[in-house]
Image (tube, helix red, strand yellow):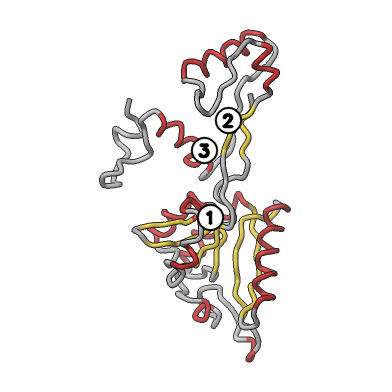
Amino acid sequence: MKKKHIIRGLAATILVAAMPLSLSACAKGGSTGGSNDNSGGPKTVTMWTHNAGNKAELGAITQIVDVYNASQKNYKVTIQAFPQDSYNQSVVSAAAAKKLPCLLDIDGPNVPNWAWAGYLAPIEGMDDTFSKFLPTVLGKYNDKTYSFGFYDVALTMVTRKSILEKYGIRIPTVDKPWTKDEFTAALDKIKASGDYQNTLDIATSFTGEWWPYAYSPFLQSFGGDLINRNDYMSAQGVLNGD
């Protein structure tokens, strides 16, 4: 049984950085990593992305930017791609130095923290547009929208039906999924066969926002959580509760 992550995080979420409050403001340049006036030509707007090395996702971002650049003549968005592993630290360091770009591409689980830290500015004047989006692709903090995604993601556990049939394990359905005990029994039965060294892969070698993104559903489905949602001040008794 292999757990397959379809897309890591809520990728390709476009964010407005905290220092510039509008495209026209950040396009004037300065400490925000924004851009040149270009002597009456299109103003250059810099966008950072964490998709360096990921041809598929970087290609999707590049296509979106190319379509936008071709749609008007006032602004030209340029992409600066960073490796995934160093991206978060690069953003935090740039925020401390007041050198954030105008736009950030970010994994969705980071949005509330970066908004709370003041790295991001809320996106205003787009409520009509956002009403057409799924709520799951909108990054909100304190009832304000700080991000929106061009695509949503999902996580699923997959295996081959033939494996379950071989070991006499019930095929789960949407109407009647496995219980915790059934799932554990299935893993134990397959493990005892000796046919597989590992019966379950949930990618615990991954780091960063992957952990809350991937594993909080397990906590929440059994009554736990990452934080006390009454005041959002502590995880005591919640993350480490029964």
Q: Residues within 10 Å of mark 1 (few under 14, many from 20)?
A: few
Question: Could you give the CA–CA distance between mark 2 and mark 1, rounded to whole angstroms?
Answer: 25 Å
SS type, badge 1? helix
At which x and y percent is residue 232? 30, 47
Q: Say which mark, if any, is on residue 202.
A: 2
Q: How many marks?
A: 3
Q: Which mark is residue 89?
A: 1
- Viewer-closest of 154 and 200: 154
**Which is nearer the eye, 208 or 223?**
223
Q: Position of residue 39 (x, y in %)?
A: 64, 91
Name the kind of residue labelled 3 in the image: Ala
Amino acid type of disc 2? Ile
Q: Nearer the viewer, mark 1 or mark 3?
A: 3
Tell me the CA gap for discs 2 and 3: 8 Å
Quadrant assignment, res 50: bottom right
Image point (60%, 64%), residue name:
48
Q: In screen coordinates, is 94 left or right of 39?
A: left
Q: Residue at x 41, y 31 (%)?
A: 221
CB under 8 Å between callouts 2 and 3? yes
Q: Nearer the viewer, residue 48 or 16?
A: 16
**Quarter occupied by residue 122:** bottom left
Residue 214, label in figure? 3
Sequence-first disc among 2 and 3? 2
Q: Residues within 10 Å of mark 2 (few under 14, many from 20)?
A: some
Residue at 53 percent across and 42 percent down: it is 210
Q: Residue at x 42, y 54 (%)?
A: 112
Q: Secondary structure at mark 3?
A: helix
Task: Residue 106: give x, y in percent of width and height.
Answer: 55, 56
Rendered location of residue 223, percent (x, y):
35, 30
**Relative to 110, is 77 on the left or the right?**
right
Circle 2 sits in a helix, a strand or a loop, which is it? loop
Please name which of the two marks, 2 or 1, marks the residue nearer to the observer: 2
